Amino acid sequence: MTTPDTVVNVGADLLADAVADQAVPVTRVDWRPPMEGTAADLAVVAADPRRHAANERALAAMLGVTATLVDVLPASEALGLEPGQFLHAGPPIGWDRAPGPLRGALMGGAALEGLVADPEDAAALFESGTGVSLEPCHHRSAVGPMAGVVTPSMWLFVLEDPATGRRSYCSLNEGLGKVLRYGAYSPEVITRLRWMGDVLGPLLQRAVRTVRDSDAGPVDVTGILTQMLQMGDEAHNRNRAGTLMLLRDLSPAMVGAIGSSGVPVADVAEALRFIGANDHFFLNLAMPACKLALDAARGIDGSTMVVAMARNGTDFGIQVAGTGDEWFTGPAQLADGLFLGDYGPEDANPDIGDSAITETAGIGGFAMATAPAIVRFVGGSVPDALATTRRMHEITLGENPRWSVPVLEFQGTPTGIDVTMVCRTGILPQINTGMAGRLAGVGQVGAGLVNPPAEIFPKALARLAELVPGRHTS
């Protein structure tokens, strides 16, 4: 019997290890069976003659978007929000199923809007439903971190794709710890939000418009994302370089407002200190930049590309390019990570927020290899970060040449999550995230790593299979 030149091993390593012990070269193939119950739908979708071209079109549409910062406006003006209307993160949810962090943020938002004198009194208001309504940020071309609550008086960043004029929106970042988006609503939280509405928002509006109307043109948010990924940020839980570059672009105009608009020196100084001390400030620009890009791929029949991943603290939902605005949902998962102070897993709420739009676009957890220092914030190790980015390439349609990873020979970040690839491999998207306390009013308790619930991808796949033209069912 002759010894083979090499042996190809598929799946478990037991046989491969035994062969390697006999000094025979082994090629290991990492193969997994598809997710249970998906084989038939995978066959139908794989045979869809539209799929390849539709996915190429979806990926190209997304990669073709440039996000520029063109304005800062109150939500009442930018989105037409009226008193009593509240936006929130994730797929649709009512007060009856809202978790503690979302309830806390809604209660604080009601106090901010003057609907109640004390946030504690807002619970009865939302329970009755009289004069209030809840709607996902995504339904208004917006995104919101963590609870994602947006009220009419809150100021929003306005991003625009100059090629199409399409826009996306996001609130201003409050910082970390006891903040509204983590469900805190103490007096200092409301005071900070009022300052952001009275001082920070109008000052940023002046600065953004000054830069936009200058010869240099508006701030190129997509360009900043390109640079910050080269500087150790992954644009979800590490935004230090991005925040500093934003300050570089806006601070001269902010200072200039002292003379041209009569803005008090103390207001400008406080705003600069606030932004400079808040490493996460740029996150609220990264998110709508990703939203703007992914929305370009919506409504492409036959495409299996995911265009949104979002969580409301109870449900985790995805939307797909080829299935319209339909949500496919499952239970939000608890993150595994590092906790602040004496907090532990029992104190944390399941995953919450629209910030997974960054992973949907190929950064955040998908780009952890470019930001190995992130493991000090969310847990894991540097080899884990490198392996995560490599693994995400197995479930994506391509890579983004704008957003490259130096340590991986400047390979583009894995981009365009494919429902069929997730179902075929069983590999779930990796998200890094902050953790909110499960009780209303607590605030942030930690940060960590989390995956979507596995069952939402077979649900999306089944719907895609139903939409294949000429499908025959028995």
Image: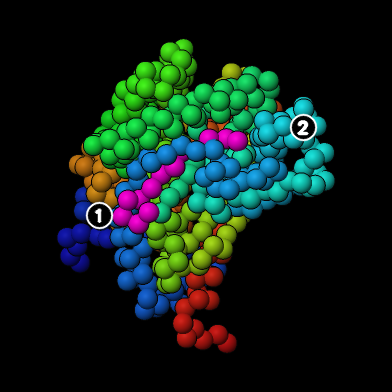
Q: Quick one: label 1, few (<14), some, or many (20+) residues within 10 Å?
A: some
| Residue 97: mark in rendering | none
Which callout, 1 or 2, points at the residue further toward the start of the chain? 1
**Residue assigned mark 1:** 26
| Pick the front one: 382 or 125 | 125
Q: Reply above or below: 34 against 150.
A: below
Element type where label 1 sits in the image: strand
Q: Residue at x 38, y 33 (%)?
A: 208
**Residue assigned mark 2:** 116
Q: Quick one: label 2, few (<14), some, or many (20+) residues within 10 Å?
A: some
Whether residue 378 is visible, yes or no, is yes
Q: Residue at x 42, y 68 (%)?
A: 300
Element type where label 2 sits in the image: loop
- In which quadrant of the rendered image does the N terminus lie? bottom left
The magenta stretch is 153-165
From mark 1 to mark 2, how far is it between C-alphas? 69 Å
Q: Position of residue 260 (x, y in %)?
A: 37, 22
- In which quadrant of the rendered image does the C terminus lie? bottom right
Which of the 4 quarters of the picture holds residue 151?
top right
Q: Residue at x 77, y 32 (%)?
A: 116
Residue 305 lies left or right of residue 98; in this view the side is left
Q: Position of residue 70 (x, y in %)?
A: 38, 41
Colouring used for the render: rainbow
Residue 467 lies left or right of residue 347; in this view the side is left
| Pick the front one: 188 or 159 | 159
Q: Position of residue 387 (x, y in %)?
A: 34, 42
Q: Reply above or below: 191 against 207.
A: above
Whether residue 383 is visible, yes or no, is no
